[in-house]
Image (tube, rainbow, N blue to C red):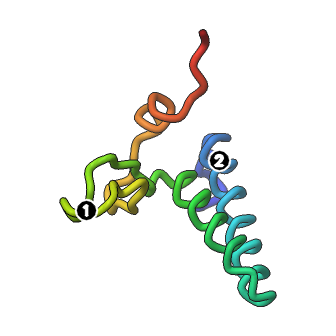
Amino acid sequence: MSAHDPPPPAKDRTRELLLEEAWSIIRAARVEGNLAVASATLERAARIAGLWSEKSAPIDAAGPPAAQVFTSEPMTAEQWSEKFAPRDG
């Protein structure tokens, strides 16, 4: 980014800051051997980045439904809001 480029939108900078903090938490949790915290934080970071998708279809027809999976196609901000924003009433 040059001195003449406009700053990134606030929501993009907020997302960047949240992801930076998530990676700090993950690194510290791994050092402490607290893999539950690392795993939960990784899930939250993936949601922030739009890389976490919820599926109800089973991966294996004989097995239980897969609750969450990573996807290589991030959600747009609008898709994320539609899926996760709190609903009134």
- The residue under the point 57% across, 61% down is 43
Quadrant (top left, top right, bottom left, bottom right) of the C terminus:
top right
Q: Amino acid at mark 1?
A: Ile
Going from the N terminus, do you reach mark 1 or mark 2 first?
2
Up-down relation of residue 80 to residue 31 (above or below)? above
- The residue under the point 52% across, 60% down is 46
**1 sits left or right of 62 in the view:** right
Total marks shown come to: 2
Q: Position of residue 7 (x, y in %)?
A: 65, 47
Tag shown at residue 7 = 2
**64 sits left or right of 13 in the view:** left
Q: Quadrant of residue 35?
A: bottom right
Q: Position of residue 29 (x, y in %)?
A: 76, 80
Toward the left, the furthest residue is 61
Q: Position of residue 64 (x, y in %)?
A: 33, 58
- The residue under the point 63% across, 41% down is 11
Q: Nearer the viewer, residue 45 or 62?
A: 62
Q: Amino acid at mark 2?
A: Pro
Q: Nearer the viewer, residue 50 or 38?
A: 38
Q: Residues within 10 Å of mark 2 (few under 14, many from 20)?
A: few
Q: Which residue is identified by label 1? A: 59
Disc 1 secondary structure class: loop
- The residue under the point 75% across, 88% down is 33
Up-down relation of residue 4 to residue 23 (above or below)? above
